[in-house]
Amino acid sequence: MVEVINNYTPPPPKGPVTLPDPDAPYDLNFRFPVRELESDKLKLVPFVPSIHGQALVEGMKPHPELLQYLPWNPFDTLHEFELHFEQRIRSDPTWMVYALLDKSKIIPGQVHGQLAGTIGYLRASPETASVEIGYVIVLPSYQRTFVSTHAIGLLLDYALQKPGDGGLGLRRVQWMAHVDNKPSVRAAERMGFKMEGVLRWDRTVPVDKANGLKPREDDVIQLKGRHSAILSMCWDDWEGGGREHVYKIMARRS
């Protein structure tokens, strides 16, 4: 009889975060090709913390509710945000975040006054030809405007269009939200995403977030949890009328 053993050991803790050299080209470290995207009113460019970070931190600081359903808290300084972005975003090749720029306010060499928020691709998988849209932060002055609609529409278009038409040719784009985050779910459904269900106890929530679920007594990780709504738009949805629906909504918001 063959002896069975289990020699797994956890990976060592990560060392201190080292920020990229601000004078060197900024490596996006993403698994899919990246390009700038734009509509008639909004431009999406890769988010670079040394360029866009200060405007985002200042825009979020008076409005902690923007991060209510995200797994981190407001940032007090640009350096604190840069450490977060390097550790949680850029070092993970399945994540890539865009800066949302209001084209009516773009001034070369200036970011303040034109940054409307962020949006990103998450969990990028060339193996399954899929990606998730997330890291959606729309600053208060741009909420209930064209920004969210155009940003989501541009990411859907790039992800689902065939490579011959300038897209990535993916099969699936998903959207996940805290089950209590009704505005996020409605925004996705309005763009044509289809509700697939709820993943219960899908992920952990920081202990200081009020919207987490209390775990059972003697839980192995002792962190709050959450249920997540999961929606998707797939290639057949896109080619079966989803593309026209997205373009129509974007035109209405122009």
Image: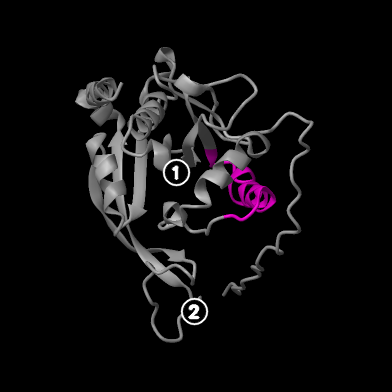
Answer few, some or many: residues within 10 Å of disc 1's Cα (few below 14, many 20 plus, some between 14 and 19). many
Give the SS element for disc 2: loop
Please give the residue where the numbered disc 2 appears in the rendered image: 220
Q: Residue 91 lies in magenta, yes or no?
A: yes
Look at label 1 and name its amino acid.
Ile
Give the SS element for disc 1: strand
Query: In front: 116, or 250?
Result: 116
Q: Residue at x 25, y 26 (%)?
A: 249
Checking the image for residue 137, the label placed there is 1
**Does 109 appear above or below 17?**
above
**Residue interval drawn in magenta:** 75-96
In this view of the protein, can residue 138 be seen by the observer? Answer: no
Give the spatial CA distance, label 1 vs label 2.
Answer: 32 Å
Q: Residue 153 lies in magenta, yes or no?
A: no
Q: Position of residue 144 (x, y in %)?
A: 31, 37
Query: In front: 248, or 76?
Result: 76
Look at label 2 and name its amino acid.
Val
**Does 86 appear above or below 245?**
below
Q: Residue at x 57, y 46 (%)?
A: 57
